Image (spheres, rainbow, N blue to C red):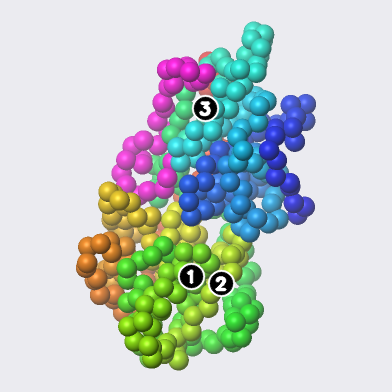
Amino acid sequence: MEPVPLSSTASLCPKSAILAPTWHIFCKVVDNFGDIGVCWRLACQLAVRGKTVRLWVDDTTALTWMAPDCHPNVTVMDCGHGLPEHVELQPDDILVDTFGCDFAINIIALQAINTPHTGHLDIIKPSKQPVWLNLEHLTAESFAQRNHTLPTIYREGAAAGWTQHYFYPGFNDKTGGLLRETDLTAQQNAFERVVWLAQMLSVSSLRFDPSTCYISLFCYEPHALAALIDQLANNKSPACLLVTAGRATAAVKAVLEHKKRLQPTYTLHKLLSIVYLDAMTQVEYDQLLWSCDLNFVRGEDSLVRAIWAGKPFVWHIYPQDDGVHHTKLEAFLQMMDAPESIIALHRAWNENPLSGIVPPLPILDLAEWGQSAMALRQKLLAQPDLCSQLIDYAGTMQEKQLKS
């Protein structure tokens, strides 16, 4: 695929060149790259389905390593220095705010300023507004299905009279589903795990060993990380910890440095090896999850990818100061219907370090956990995916507007 250059203006896709409705996805990068990760996957899935997509994002840095090849039908609109002065939306466009991002309302205001009120195509009239959706965070909590597709009407400002609809991803047929490629199963069936792992390990002068338990680590700074390393180091069977770049690498190195300060002669057991990985593309990260026997993941995007991998996984939920993430975690564990041991591991992995409590980690039971992970994967594969549901819902809303 030929790379599509990043753009800071709307001139790459002039009005005269638009032959079909454009999907505008708006992304504000908060931290940890989860927002842009979800948005890029969604943009690509829309493009694969033949949609013209603009991804508006205020920080494109992560895309340079996350998606270096770009996508031929996705135009990235770099808003790092503000929105372009001239923006043209069409009545049949689809606007998707993500995670409460406020870009769309600002673009609507810009269009209101720059569009003359000619009467025959006044984009500001609510009766001719584009479909406007707000893609929310993923959760298994019950409010997701209650609020899914609920409307909110703007009462003032440039979008006065416009309606925005909430769209909730989720884990049942009363929500919007999960992001999933149309050919995901075919990709996984064609994947050669041993070849991929052998090549990945060779960079660190290691060889693939079928008796080794390979574990991927993508996390924040879990309080139980030291306990996990101790458990793996004292196991009777070999293990290899594949640590992703960034916070996970820093966290592991901090744990090992702390152990060395307490015990200057401390060294890892020979049966445990640790590999620090470079930044990976989304494709490479998916392959890492497919390759490993156990995956520690964090945030929303990697959780979904771990589910599709069908391997045992532990989710490090994004910690919040008010502790509401624990409620979110418990809702997920209930939906997951997992064995008690994997539930205990999730709770220990997400324990607040300020509590002073370090729950013991259960012994790894990959056989039972693997059966649970596959059951969850099969259940969720039977549901319509998020991208398909977004397309269907937007089409239904457009039909309603034409009839009104």
Q: Position of residue 86 (x, y in %)?
A: 67, 25
Q: Which region is colored magenta?
A: 136-162
Q: What is the three-letter code of the residue carrying label 3?
A: Ile
Which residue does the image show at 43% across and 34% down from the upper left?
Answer: 166
The residue at the point 52 percent across, 68 percent down is 244
Q: Is residue 74 visible?
A: yes
Q: Residue at x 38, y 91 (%)?
A: 265
Which callout, 1 or 2, points at the residue further toward the start of the chain?
Answer: 1
Spatial CA span between label 3 and label 2: 40 Å
Which residue occupies the foreground of this view, 138 or 14? Answer: 14
On the image, numbered disc 1 is attached to which residue? 249
Q: In x, y percent, where is residue 204?
A: 60, 82
Identified by mark 1, the residue type is Thr
Residue underneath mark 2: 277
* The N terminus: image quadrant: bottom right
| Quadrant assignment, res 103 | top right
Q: Nearer the viewer, mark 1 or mark 2?
A: 1
